[in-house]
Structures are given as structure tokens and as C-alpha cells.
């Protein structure tokens, strides 16, 4: 039953209905520790999906299982309907871009790219042209003869991408490929790679612990925690409707306030008693938890001033800090009863606001998220 | 200020003396190999190559040199294969107790050669292994294994194994991935280990002495025999050739690998 | 249907750990099995043999080796050989290693190669050269005569002087190289810092340089001692039967007099000495290297 419900959920979330890569009930243990437990995920053809989570959540293990570099202790992995669970890595035809690129230092750029074609015994006459094409794709033709050690980090990444793509893989796996690049270059490469993969319509799975990267690049994001997928959805869904407290915490900024929920709020709402007063949350959004809960609010949902209507929560708090970001300004409030700060983002700082001022804040009850305390 | 300067100078003098001290016996052997007289007097008298010609006629010298080269080459090669495979499994933590295995494989180096030789002799007798060639070969694999293990482990510790994964994803089976990617990348480091293993085997006396027989004598044993029986400059000529071969081998290795990487042992 | 299939797979007991080792794990086996069969077992058989003679279980070998003053003297000779060679190498090698580590980079590589090269030359060849050097008409006597230290050539070969002169010559690089490898990493500014704090050169050496180079010294000492205590070729050629060591007794027991029980017992005593040296030196080297890693 649960499986059916989950599949229905997938069908809704998946923009294209076909299940190209299908990972079903996969389990992986290392000794006594279970790293992945009954994990399911389906990826549509030419979709770009991110596995996002903290280190140790099992995302790299999942990637290695799909690649065939590890064997699962249970479950099934299929691409395009072909069960690959027992197929060794070298026969899966899956491309991988490794975290440190894993380029071969004893070979030139050209030879690196040709490596896969040679291993698959492609006709000699064909190899040269395909290598040139692959290098052209990543704009590295001019470096064909170079040694790997003579390339910059960004160039190495391009070669790694070309090497993975030249064999026309049925799936591309990317294991934190941007972590070795500096911020500026990383942003350029992210967009460039995204465009390239979209043009080639190649199905890609991207492992990262960087939420910004996942939000920028993905068609869908799978947020992982402790060997499970906590939420699978579009970047917008994952950001604005986190399925769990962990997703809320891991993706984007948020203010979190502990409290106690009472079953009956007024007008179909939940009422939560918190140290800063009662907060109401819409029942439509939350499944009506009771007892110890955590209230979550995104910083851009909170506005300054009195509430415009009854559908809003309102509190008064003292402004502690102003952090200027250029395109936006973050305000940090520190109510005496709370340990954490309340984070508010505004496009423009109202005049006359200074730290120490007591200000009224409001936000819609529809944007108030409630999660049971773990 | 005076004490440091003087002691510093004394250190340099000491280094100079050490170099003279280390090289005198080697130079003398070479010098003696070119003398005319059959006695080793100093300063050497005359110049001739006759002792080099007499190597050919000397009983068994060439045969034992050939035997030593064979044993050293084959045992190094076998150690190289067995040791590299073992080291990969240890470094990749594929087996429990990897560190203990690595220590064990390198431990023959810590045991006196004579003790090893006696141990081999006893066991060979016990199982009725009479073939001197086979016994020598087995003993020399044990002898060379530590050199290989040490350098291979050191080389592997600097090797990025995701390259092997990359090769597999590109269509190489695991053994082929090791051969195409791991081997070429660790080869320079391993070469130096192999060279030292070869030299250790080629020069070995204390193990081999218990395992040779009349027909199967390695070069060190033959040389020492010769020294005790008829100490003439033929031995010096053989030794001089050995020295030159060593220097050539070192230079070749330097060209291939670079001296810096060789000296990490 | 698929759900059921999956569940059976999931609930299946974890496969037996040892057999589940990935295929590559068997790579360890050929080498390991070989070394167990060809190395560990023979050494264990040797140890077992030392407790046995023709009549069965016996401690006769040990009674002889550890009870007879003659053999005690021989064990002592071996230890003395190791000790004097080690001390001599240390006294000569330490300052040489110091100079080597302070040489300009280019020269340092060359000097290093020159220290290293003799190690690759056969011990027999070197000892042969040493024996020629120390003949009555050899270069050493010639040198001493011309420098006026002696009036008549001395007999050097087959004296203890020849023995230690030769032993130190053969094993000196094994002392210099480990000390040098530690000294090279020593920041010369440390000694400057000590001097700037008012430490005299002697204090600086004793309190800064020496303690920091101790790991190299320990490595050198254990290396030279463990090899020289068991040396066979060099003592045999340079002094012969006048100076009997454990090695000579062992070799004679097996090659000449065929007293295997005596030989095996002596071999085990030597094995114990070797193992003791290894453990003692790791004990002394370990804390120092750990401190080094943390720092």
C-alpha cells in the first residue's frame, strides 16, 4: 500500500511520466551499519536530479551503487527497463564525473578522452573524430595535446565531462564535481554544464551537499538524510514546502521556534504555544501535529509592520543585527525568550531602523510550517 | 661565535673523510682489476685487461653470474606481482587486518639472513625439496618481498584510486583497469623498489650459502670461494664489472624515474 | 508481485562476511599464502627444531649455547661487534649527516647519491677492497708510512682493528641516511631561534638539534646494530676464526660440523636479539614520530 502511495506521489512530482532509471528498495550495509535502507527513486529520461544531503547521508553510496562500483545488499537497479543489479560496472555504460575528476595523469587530454572509446573497442577511424567532437563540446580542442597536470581546475573538469560523455553513456553521474573550484568559477561552470546536459538531453544524477548548487541546477532534488530520501520534488517544492524538519533546516534559511501544539485552533488552524506567544498555522498545509513541535518560517515570508489581516501571525521583537547583502538585507531579531534568532529578509531597509529598536513582524499563517519535534 | 663555526667546519671535514673512506675500497678494487701483477700491491703497477679476459676461463664465474641474474630477476618479478596485488588489497582495506598483513610481508627484512637461510634449509630438507634452484628461488622471493612491499605501499598511498573507478566506468574490467591505469602510475616508484630487490637478491650471501649445491652456485658464493681458493685480480675484475653494472643500472633508473624518487626507500 | 520479490531480498540474511569479500579481496591471497608457507612456517619450524635433537624433545642446544662460557663469549662477541660498529658509525655519521643536510641543494643531491652508491655495491666486493687496502703493502700502510705515523708496515688484516674499520665502512651509510632524512626536515631557523634566546651553541645542540633528530638516530642505531650484530661476510673475510660470532657458529654448525640442534638454538638466540632490537627501537621511535605527526 505504502509503495502504491509513494508511486502515486512520484507520478505527480515527475514532469515526464517514464521511469528511465528505477532504483527499487535498495539496501546497503557496511558491517553493522545500514547506510541505505529500502531506498526507492525513479528518474525520468533526460531529467537532471540532485541527491542533496549532509556528508554521511548515503548519497555517494547511492551513486556508487547506481554506477556498479558497489553491490547492494538488497533491491534492484534498472535503466530503461534493463535490470542492471548484477551487471558489472564496466558493462553498464554509465558516465561518471568524479569529485577530483580522476583524470589519468600519465595520458594527455586527448588520450584521456579516447580512453573509454578504446576500452569499448570502438573502430580506430571513428575515435579521432569523436574525441574532437567531445573536446569541442567543452571547448577544449586547443588543449588536446596537453598533459593533465598542465590544466587548471576548471579545464580539468571540462576534460572529465568530455571523457564521461564521449562514450554516449545511458546515464551521467556527477559526484560533487564543483567542490574543487573557487566560487566564481563554480557558478560559471554550473550554468555551462547545465546547458550542455540539457542540450544533449542526457539523464543526470548529481550528488552535492551544497543546497544552492542543487537549487540552481536541478529539475528535481532528492533530499537525503540518514540513508533515506526525505523529500523528492522540484527545487520550488523542496524550498517552499519542506516535507520534514530536516529538509527545512538543510535547504535554505529558516527561523525555527519550538513550541506545543494544541489540537484545536480557531477556524481550522493549529495553535502553537511558543516562548514568543501563540503562533497559528494553517491546517491545509500541515497535517495537524499535536504535542511538542517546531515552527518554521522562511525569512522572505516575514515582513515588517502590523499584520494586515487575521490570516497573519504577528509578534514584536528587538532588532539585534542588520546584515547587508546588496540585493537584499537580512535583519536578525532576538526575542529574549528565544535562543535562536528570527531571520527576516527585506529588499530595502526602511529608514530609521536601527539595532535595538522593537519592531512588529508579521507573516501569513499559510506560510507557517509545523513539524513534530524529532 | 667561534664554536659553531669550527664545529660546522669539522662536520664538513668529516663528510669529506667519510666519502673518501667509503669510496677507497671500491676504487681500489677497480684499480687492482687493471694491474699487471697478480699481487695486490699499492701503488698498482702497469696496466692490463688480462684479468677481464681471465674471467671467461675462471671456473664457474660466468655460470654463477648468469644463475644469480636469473634468480634475482625471476624472484623480483614474482615478488612484484604477488606484492603489488597484496598491497592493493591492503591499501584499499579490502581485507581485515591489512596493516598486520603489510608488516608481516615486510618482516623478512628484520630477520638476520643466516637465520632465514637455516630456516629454508631445514624446511626444504623436511619436505624433501632437493632442487637447489627451486629452493633458491623461493628463498629469494621471500628476500625480495619486503623491498617490493615497502615501495609499492608507498606508491599506492599517493595513488588516487578513483582513477581505477573511472577506468571501470569507461569500460575496463577491474583487472584491466589496474593494468591500464594503476600500473603506469605507480611504476616509477615501484621501479626503484624492484631495483633494490634485484640488488639485494643478486648480492645475497647469508641465505644462499645454505641452499646452493656444487652445480648451482650464485655469484657471491662463487666469488667468496674464489677469494679463499685463488685470490688473484680475476675476482677484482669481476667485482669491477659488477660495480659498473650497478652504476649503469642506477643511471638508467635515474633517467627513467629520477634519483629523488628512488631515494625514498 | 514486485513488492513481494523485493521484500524477500531485503529480509534475506546478510551474506556470510568472509565469502562476501569483493572479488578483488582475493588479491591478497597469493602473496600472503606464499609468505606464510615459504617464510612463516620455515621460521616456526626452525624455532621448533631448536627444542629438539635426535632423541626427541631436548633443551641440549640451549644448555650449550646459554650455559657454556665458550658460547656465552661468542654471543658477547656478536653484541660487541654490533655495539662498536654502531657507536663508531654514529660518531662518524652524525656530523657527516649534519654537513650533508646543510649543503646547498644541488650539491646535496650529488653528495646524497655518493653516500648512497656504496650501499648498492656488493658487500663482498667492498670487503675484498678493504682487505686489499689493509694488506701489509696496501694503501693504508702506505698512507701511514708516508704520513710518518709508523716506521714499518703494520699487520692489519685479521686484527680487530681491521674488523671494525671494515664493518664501519660497510654499514656507515645505513647510519647516515636515516639521520640525514630527519635532519633535512629540520628547520635551520630553530637553532637560530634558540641562539637568539641566548642559548649557547652547546646548549642549542643538546636541547634543540639532538632531541629533534633523535628519531633518525634511533632508526640508524637500530638498523646498523641489527645488521652488524648478525654480519657474516665481512667479519669472515677480515678477521676469520680469530673472532667467533653467533653467525660463524651458526654457519659452521650447519655447513661443517652438522650439529643442527646447536645451530638452531643459536639461530633462535639471534632471532630473539633481532626481534628485541626491532621492538625496542619501535618503542623509542613511536612517541617521537607521533609527536611529529601532531605537530
Image (spheres, coloured by chain):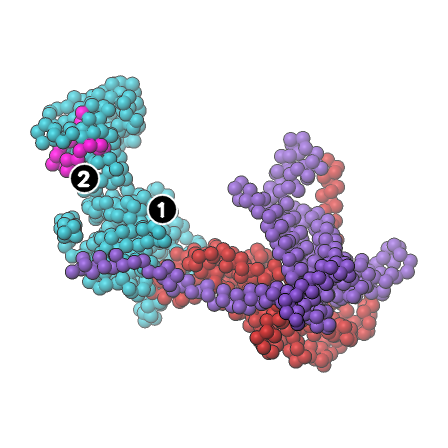
Chain colours: A cyan, B red, C purple
- From the viewer's perspective, is residue A151 above or below residue C189? below
Q: Picture quarter containing residue C121?
A: bottom right
Residue displayed at 66% across by 65% down = C58
- Name the residue beneath numbered marker 2: A241
Residue ranking furthest to the right: C151
Q: Picture quarter containing residue A108?
A: bottom left
C45 lies left or right of C202: left
B185 lies left or right of C289: left
Residue A293 counted in the magenta span: yes
Residue displayed at 44% across by 54% down = A149
- From the viewer's perspective, is residue C277 above or below residue A290? below
Of circles 1 and 2, which is in front? 2
Residue B39 counted in the magenta span: no
Q: Earlier in the sequence, mark 1 or mark 2?
A: 1
Residue displayed at 47% across by 57% down = B98
A163 lies left or right of B100: left
- From the viewer's perspective, is residue C74 above or below residue B66? above
- Residue B60 x %, y %: 69, 79
> For mark 2, does the 10 Å Cα neighbourhood hold few (<14), some (14 to 19), or many (20 or more) residues?
some
- Residue C149 x %, y %: 87, 54
**What range of the chain is rendered magenta?**
A278-294
- Residue A111 x %, y %: 39, 63
- Name the residue beneath numbered marker 1: A179
Residue displayed at 27% across by 62% down = A85
> For mark 1, does the 10 Å Cα neighbourhood hold few (<14), some (14 to 19), or many (20 or more) residues?
some
Q: Nearer the viewer, residue A352 or C150?
A: C150
Q: Please identify the quadrant where the N terminus of chain C is shown.
A: bottom left
Amino acid at each position: 500500500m505504502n509503495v502504491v502511495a509513494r508511486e502515486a506521489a512520484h507520478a505527480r512530482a515527475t514532469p515526464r511520466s517514464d521511469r528511465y532509471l528505477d532504483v527499487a528498495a535498495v539496501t546497503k550495509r557496511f558491517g553493522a551499519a545500514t547506510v541505505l535502507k529500502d531506498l526507492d527513486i525513479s528518474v525520468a529520461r533526460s531529467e537532471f536530479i540532485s541527491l542533496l544531503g549532509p556528508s554521511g547521508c548515503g548519497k555517494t553510496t547511492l551513486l556508487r551503487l547506481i554506477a556498479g562500483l558497489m553491490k547492494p545488499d538488497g533491491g534492484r537497479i534498472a535503466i530503461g527497463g534493463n535490470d542492471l543489479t548484477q551487471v558489472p560496472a564496466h558493462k553498464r555504460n554509465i558516465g561518471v564525473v568524479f569529485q577530483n575528476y580522476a583524470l589519468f595523469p600519465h595520458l594527455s587530454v586527448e588520450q584521456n578522452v579516447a580512453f573509454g572509446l578504446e576500452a569499448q573497442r570502438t573502430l580506430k577511424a571513428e575515435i579521432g573524430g569523436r574525441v574532437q567532437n567531445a573536446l569541442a563540446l567543452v571547448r577544449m580542442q586547443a588543449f588536446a595535446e596537453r598533459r593533465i597536470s598542465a590544466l587548471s581546475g576548471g579545464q580539468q573538469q571540462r576534460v572529465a565531462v568530455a571523457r564521461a560523455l564521449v562514450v554516449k553513456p545511458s546515464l551521467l553521474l556527477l559526484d560533487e564535481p564543483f567542490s574543487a573550484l573557487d566560487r566564481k568559477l563554480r557558478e560559471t561552470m554550473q550554468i555551462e554544464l547545465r546547458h550542455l546536459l540539457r542540450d544533449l538531453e542526457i539523464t543526470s544524477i548529481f550528488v552535492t551537499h551544497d543546497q544552492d548548487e542543487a537549487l540552481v541546477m536541478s529539475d528535481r532534488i532528492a533530499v537525503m538524510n540518514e540513508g533515506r530520501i526525505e523529500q523528492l520534488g522540484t527545487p520550488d517544492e523542496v524550498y517552499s514546502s519542506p516535507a520534514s524538519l530536516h529538509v527545512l533546516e538543510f535547504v535554505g534559511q529558516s527561523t525555527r521556534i519550538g513550541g506545543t501544539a494544541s489540537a484545536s485552533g480557531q477556524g481550522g488552524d493549529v495553535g502553537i504555544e511558543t516562548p514568543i506567544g501563540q503562533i497559528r498555522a494553517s491546517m491545509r498545509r500541515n497535517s495537524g501535529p499535536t504535542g511538542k513541535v517546531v515552527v518554521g518560517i522562511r525569512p522572505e515570508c516575514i515582513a515588517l509592520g502590523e499584520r494586515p489581516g487575521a490570516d497573519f501571525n504577528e509578534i514584536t521583537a528587538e532588532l539585534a543585527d542588520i546584515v547587508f547583502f546588496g540585493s537584499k538585507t537580512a535583519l536578525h531579531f532576538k526575542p529574549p525568550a528565544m535562543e535562536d534568532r528570527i531571520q527576516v529578509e527585506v529588499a530595502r531597509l526602511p529608514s530609521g531602523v536601527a539595532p535595538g529598536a522593537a519592531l512588529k513582524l508579521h507573516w501569513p499563517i499559510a506560510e507557517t510550517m509545523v513539524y513534530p519535534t524529532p | 661565535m667561534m664554536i659553531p663555526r669550527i664545529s660546522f667546519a669539522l662536520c664538513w671535514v668529516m663528510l669529506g673523510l667519510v666519502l673518501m673512506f667509503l669510496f677507497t675500497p671500491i676504487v681500489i678494487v677497480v684499480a687492482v682489476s687493471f694491474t699487471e701483477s697478480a699481487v695486490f700491491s699499492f701503488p698498482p703497477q702497469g696496466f692490463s685487461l688480462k684479468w677481464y679476459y681471465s674471467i671467461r676461463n675462471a671456473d664457474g664465474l660466468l655460470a654463477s653470474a648468469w644463475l644469480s641474474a636469473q634468480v634475482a630477476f625471476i624472484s623480483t618479478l614474482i615478488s612484484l606481482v604477488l606484492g603489488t596485488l597484496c598491497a592493493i588489497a591492503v591499501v584499499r582495506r579490502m581485507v581485515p587486518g591489512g596493516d598486520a598483513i603489510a608488516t608481516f610481508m615486510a618482516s623478512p627484512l628484520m630477520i638476520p639472513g643466516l637465520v632465514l637461510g637455516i630456516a629454508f634449509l631445514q624446511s626444504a630438507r623436511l619436505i624433501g625439496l632437493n632442487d637447489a634452484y627451486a629452493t633458491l628461488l623461493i628463498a629469494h622471493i621471500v628476500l625480495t618481498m619486503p623491498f617490493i612491499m615497502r615501495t609499492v605501499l608507498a606508491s599506492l598511498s599517493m595513488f588516487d584510486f578513483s582513477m581505477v573507478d573511472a577506468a571501470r566506468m569507461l569500460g575496463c574490467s577491474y583487472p584491466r583497469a589496474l593494468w591500464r591505469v594503476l600500473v603506469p602510475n605507480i611504476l616509477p616508484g615501484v621501479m626503484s623498489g624492484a631495483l633494490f630487490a634485484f640488488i639485494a637478491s643478486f648480492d645475497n650471501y647469508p641465505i644462499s650459502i645454505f641452499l646452493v649445491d656444487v652445480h648451482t652456485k650464485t655469484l657471491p658464493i662463487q666469488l667468496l670461494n674464489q677469494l679463499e681458493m685463488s685470490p688473484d685480480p680475476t675476482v677484482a675484475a669481476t667485482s669491477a664489472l659488477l660495480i659498473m653494472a650497478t652504476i649503469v643500472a642506477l643511471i638508467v633508473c635515474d633517467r627513467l624515474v629520477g634519483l629523488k624518487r628512488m631515494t625514498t626507500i | 508481485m514486485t513488492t513481494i520479490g523485493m521484500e524477500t531480498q531485503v529480509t534475506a540474511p546478510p551474506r556470510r562476511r568472509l565469502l562476501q569479500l569483493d572479488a578483488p579481496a582475493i588479491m591478497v591471497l597469493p602473496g600472503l599464502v606464499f609468505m606464510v608457507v615459504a617464510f612463516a612456517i620455515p621460521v616456526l619450524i626452525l624455532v621448533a627444531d631448536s627444542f629438539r635433537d635426535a632423541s626427541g624433545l631436548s633443551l641440549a642446544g640451549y644448555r650449550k649455547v646459554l650455559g657454556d662460557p665458550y658460547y656465552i663469549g661468542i654471543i658477547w662477541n656478536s653484541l660487541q661487534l654490533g655495539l662498536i660498529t654502531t657507536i663508531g658509525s654514529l660518531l662518524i655519521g652524525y656530523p657527516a649527516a649534519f654537513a650533508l643536510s646543510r649543503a646547498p641543494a644541488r650539491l646535496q643531491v650529488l653528495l646524497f647519491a655518493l653516500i648512497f652508491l656504496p650501499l648498492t655495491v656488493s658487500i663482498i666486493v667492498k670487503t675484498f677492497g678493504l682487505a686489499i687496502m689493509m694488506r701489509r703493502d696496501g694503501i693504508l700502510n702506505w698512507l701511514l708510512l708516508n704520513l710518518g705515523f709508523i716506521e714499518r708496515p703494520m699487520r692489519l688484516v685479521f686484527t680487530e682493528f681491521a674488523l671494525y674499520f671494515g664493518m664501519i665502512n660497510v654499514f656507515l651509510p645505513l647510519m647516515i641516511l636515516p639521520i640525514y632524512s630527519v635532519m633535512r626536515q629540520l628547520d635551520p631557523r630553530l637553532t637560530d631561534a634558540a641562539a637568539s634566546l641566548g642559548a649557547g651553541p652547546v646548549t642549542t645542540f643538546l636541547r634543540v638539534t639532538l632531541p629533534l633528530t633523535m628519531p633518525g638516530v634511533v632508526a640508524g642505531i637500530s638498523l646498523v646494530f641489527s645488521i652488524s650484530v648478525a654480519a657474516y661476510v665481512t667479519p669472515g673475510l677480515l678477521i676469520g676464526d680469530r673472532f667467533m660470532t653467533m653467525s660463524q657458529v651458526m654457519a659452521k654448525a650447519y655447513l661443517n660440523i652438522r650439529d643442527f640442534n646447536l645451530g638452531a638454538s643459536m639461530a633462535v638466540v639471534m632471532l630473539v636479539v633481532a626481534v628485541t632490537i626491532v621492538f625496542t627501537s619501535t618503542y623509542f621511535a613511536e612517541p617521537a614520530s607521533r609527536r611529529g605527526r601532531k605537530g
